[in-house]
Image (cartoon, rainbow, N blue to C red):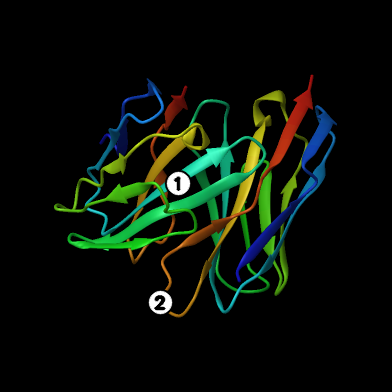
Amino acid sequence: EDQVTQSPEALRLQEGESSSLNCSYTVSGLRGLFWYRQDPGKGPEFLFTLYSAGEEKEKERLKATLTKKESFLHITAPKPEDSATYLCAVQAGGGSEKLVFGKGTKLTVNP
Amino acid sequence: NAGVTQTPKFRILKIGQSMTLQCTQDMNHNYMYWYRQDPGMGLKLIYYSVGAGITDKGEVPNGYNVSRSTTEDFPLRLELAAPSQTSVYFCASSSPVNTEAFFGQGTRLTVV
């Protein structure tokens, strides 16, 4: 069964304090790994897709990386507006169109 | 370009009542999904569809039904609402080429 585990569940940072969020996964043939940002009361907002080990993608202060067993979302010099819940999801290969989500990491960045 | 639109945004149901959550997308996406999100539990897939006329069960389908008569619309039907169906429901869509899913704003449902 495909599984996604995110850690930590919650993370508090001071503005400018860099850190990383972890997403560990087990899947039968990874087709894609996705990172989403979710603000309170809103739907998830797409950030990145990673397809193969060694791949990296960046957007502003965020950088996502992928290995064969996990993905990291690195946040460099975060700002209070980066506060949100970050969700990781995987899509298995073999014709499956389903996304399996982790429970998310709630990030709070204090000014 | 509206993306994925869900209605209603909020709803309170009594136990045993039925309702339909509406979802429509204007991106001509083949794939559509319904998820529920409970506090601290992440998103769970209820049903999904890979095209008009084709639907399949996800992880938690019991108590729900779907239909997909057009590419744009993917309504979710709740029959005989139960307190366990209190949740936030999200509809999403994606294409086979660009596999990232786009989500609606959600429907917050309370069953009392």
User: Horizontal and vertical percent for residue A106?
Assistant: 71, 36
- What chain is tagged by disc 1? B
Q: Residues within 10 Å of mark 1 (few under 14, many from 20)?
A: many
Quadrant, the N terminus of chain B = top left
Query: Which three-letter amino acid code belongs to the residue tagged 2?
Result: Gly
Residue on which disc 1 sits: B35
- Residue drawn at (68%, 66%) of the image: A25
Query: Which three-letter amino acid code belongs to the residue tagged 1?
Result: Tyr
Mark 1 in CB contact with mark 2 (< 8 angstroms): no
User: Horizontal and vertical percent for residue B89?
Assistant: 44, 37
Going by the image, does B102 lie left or right of A67?
left
Residues B55 and A12: in front is B55
Going by the image, does A35 lie left or right of B108?
right
Query: Does mark 2 fall on the same chain as mark 1?
Result: no
Secondary structure found at label 1: strand
- Residue drawn at (71%, 70%) of the image: A67
User: Horizontal and vertical percent for residue B71?
Assistant: 18, 53
Secondary structure found at label 2: loop
What numbered label is drawn on residue B56?
none
Q: Which of marks 1 and 2 is in front?
A: 1
- What chain is tagged by disc 2? A
Going by the image, does A51 lie left or right of B97?
right
Q: Residue furthest left?
A: B69
Residues B47 and B25: in front is B47
Residue on which disc 2 sits: A95
Residues B27 and A78: in front is B27
Q: In which quarter of the image is residue B107?
A: top left
